[in-house]
Image (cartoon, grey):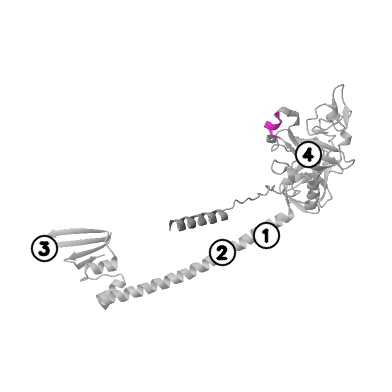
Amino acid sequence: MTSKFISLYCFLAFSSYAYCQISTRQIADKQEVPTRPYDSLSYRMTMENYKEFIGQTIYVLPESKLNSYYKPNAIQSYSNFSKFPSDAGNVKENQYKPIQTSEYSFVSDYNSLSAKYFKIIDVIDNTDRDKFMNKYNEMGLYLKLESQENHDTLFYQVVKVRQHLDSRTSYPFIIVGYFEKLKQLNINKRFIAQKDITELSEINSGKPVNCFAGSEWNCVDVTLIETKGGIYLEPVFVFKDSLSNEIAVGVEYAWEGVNTSIKDFSSKESVLREKRKQEEELKKQIAEEKMQKQQNVIQSKKNSASTAQAKKIRRENLIKKYGINQGTLIADGKVAVGMTKEMCIASWGRPQDINRTTGTFGVHEQWVYNLKSYLYFEKDILTTIQN
């Protein structure tokens, strides 16, 4: 018996061991979150969206000859462009197509960048201080660019440290997709001035033009112009009125020499849409008020019917309880000498006050309902009514 038990135990243990296998599995590599496509509605970069700009083309803005920093005979140059993802400084080897400005100073050739197109082929994030502090000149967020003219590779430092990116409001270039989107969305669209705007100049003749609130303008172009307030050419809308006067309207801001921006206008389409919305809301409000009135009438009829039914039932119950004469008086809110206290309460309700007088004649009660209505009781029976 013992040997059979041992044999059975060994068989079960061996069976359990035979089916207890060690398995292995492979875990897939973590997939990167796909980059959203560039929507062309903004040109500002953030640490969250900069990868969206990869594949986009930029146009390097020429310098405005009207700005106070412009010097006709001076060597013009751009800052932050370099041959490597690092600060260009004045080092010749770091400059893109270097030009010497002094014995030890070099800058990138202005003419090799100005009014040229470059494709963003990558964005390099070297903003990690812990990683690049020992190589401070390499810190920054860099656009890796390819010249559309000769396929040269160069870099543009957007910011040195990531904290500065949120405050960056302008660049020496414009995203071509953004510029094209401005044209697509606005050319041949009509706009309405939201306020009076004075001291405007007609861009073809220079004559003064006034733009009054409510006046209509047609967007006929999106272009770049020189302004006194900007270092580089600025994008503007060209608006034309019914008299063929053309004015420059800032895309986002008003500049010196451009005294108005798109913020001072509303598209006629949006104005009409807002008007239709207001009309629809007014119709809806009127319909809701009408419906509410109908519901109130219906509810009032229901309440009246319910009240009438309740009164009928109450009258029937009072007549059944007190008889036809007394029950009818109580149902009509009347009292009569000979009624009991219970009947009076059923007819007039409970009194505001009760005055009791006790004497050899017994207990008399005066029930006060108001300044002119009194009921007098002797032994629970109404004896006197004073109105």
Q: Which residue is mark 1?
A: 276
Between 281 and 149, the one nearer to me in the picture:
149
Q: Which residues are magenta?
A: 127-133
Say if 5 sits above or below 68 in the image: below
Name the amino acid, label 2: Glu
Query: How far is disc 2 from disc 4 in space, using C-alphas?
Result: 57 Å
Tag 4's secondary structure?
Answer: strand
Picture coordinates of residue 206, whole percent (x, y): 85, 41
Say if 226 sits above or below 15 in the image: above
Say if 215 sits above or below 229 in the image: below
Q: Which residue is mark 2?
A: 288
Residue farthest along the top direction in this orientation: 103
Secondary structure character of the magenta stretch overall: helix
Query: How far is disc 1 from disc 3 in space, using C-alphas?
Result: 85 Å
Residue 143, labelled with which disc?
Answer: 4
Q: Are marks 1 and 4 in contact (CB under 8 Å)?
A: no
Quarter of the rendering occupied by the C terminus: bottom left
